[in-house]
Amino acid sequence: MSYIKDIKLADEGKKRIAWAERNMPVLSSIKKEFERDKPLKDVKVAACLHVTVETANLILALKAGGAKIRLAGSNPLSTQDDVSAALVEEGVEVFAIRGENDKEYYECIEKILTMEPNVILDDGSDTIATVHSKSSKIFDFWDPTTKSSGHEELIDGIFGACEETTTGVVRLRALEKDNALKFPVIAVNDAKTKMMFDNRYGTGQSALHGIMNATNFLFAGKDVVIIGYGWCGRGIASRARGLGSNVIVVETDPTKSLEASMDGFRVMPMLEAAKIGDLFITAAGDISVVRREHFEEMKDGAILANSGHFNVEIDIEDLEEMAVSVSEAKENVMEYKLEDGRRLYLLAEGRLVNLSCAYGHPSEVMDMSFADQALSVKYIVENKEKLENKVYSVPKEIDDEVATRKLEAMGIEIERLTEEQVKYLNSWEMGT
């Protein structure tokens, strides 16, 4: 029933999954507890996530807890085909092949929904959008295929969902604001143990890894423009500076712009940065943050990379209209030659560069993100009768538990409050 590239790749995938598991001690400890207690017995989980070795360990932890799972890829270029094969051999139904076109991508989402899931795990909210699309126009912009039918018949059987990304949470809060959200969703992205580590340290390292893999770019001495200064942008900027780059930040939020300036980065509008940059990395979570007016100002040889979830941040349509010729310079690098002879280079079709051109975030950091996911699924199942149709933050007790387990796994002991200190922090009477 699965849709994968080649089952013969399974052995290599299993080795890589096992290697990642060695560096995911928190998730491994949860898997052991799930195996013992079976908190997800017979719960049907439809997951649309990046099919990586780290994701595989999450899926296997949920399976150990008794869940029945189907998995689709959340981005056409992020699937690792050997991982898909390995999971199929482990008894998971997988619908994901690297290089899917848009039609195949949504067909895979349709396949996982035919299991009539109780819980959805999403990365970008395309699956949740597909379920809701008939009842709301909030997602019409993203892809016309999401308007085709919807799956309102599934809603009564869905306990809730988890969303992994900043972009996906933005979409879901818009859906909630529209009073159209049909089941509860936990914004896993907003957990401190996800956002502050996965987004910052994971994206910061893996985005640069992807760019170097694709181009062998030397960061030292180059002008690198980061568009967006959320947690992902912060991580990319700090890592680029660590490699010796002159970092420029483009940001629309005044507070984040002020923070970037006080972090020691130059801050300016995109039109000015376009004239300077050797490399542009988008992490804004918005459409067309780099577009025609900016391409017109860029120097010959400028490189364009995206680290946001969707391939809408760099306006590829504008770039194609301006180009007199388009050719593949090398794998994952397209050359756009403009009328005046300048050449601009787009990496990975404008899709997220860290997964399209590299392996994605290191296992050590995804350990926390996927521990949040696993415990949030358990929370949804245990509290399904109490949860309203809202976007919830990850409960603080889950966030704190994941952080505590991670510290223990790292062999780090922290300070404890005394009884007097606890009393002071809970009192209004004690002052100077």
Image (cartoon, rainbow, N blue to C red):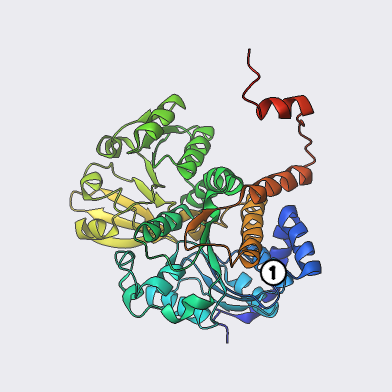
Would residue 414 appear left or right of 282 to someone viewing this image? right
In the rendered image of this protein, does residue 346 appear above or below residue 253?
Answer: below
Residue sitting nearer the eye, 416 or 303? 416
Decide: is 305 above or below 162. Answer: above
Location of mark 1 (residue): 60
Q: Is residue 418 visible?
A: no
* 294 left or right, relative to 89: left
In which image quadrant can residue 223 be found?
Answer: top left
**Image location of residue 210, percent across then percent down:** 51, 52
Residue projecting furthest to the bottom:
1
Q: Residue at x 48, y 57 (%)?
A: 391
Q: Is residue 166 visible?
A: yes
In percent of width and height, residue 339 lies at 18, 53
Instruction: Examine the rendered structure and indicate whether residue 322 appears above or below residue 232.
Output: below
Secondary structure found at label 1: helix
Q: Residue furthest front?
A: 429
Quadrant of the frame with the C terminus? top right
Q: Amino acid at mark 1?
A: Leu
Instruction: Identify the residue shown where x is 41% and y is 47%.
Output: 283
Badge 1: residue crowd in 10 Å (few <14, some 14–19, many ≥20): some
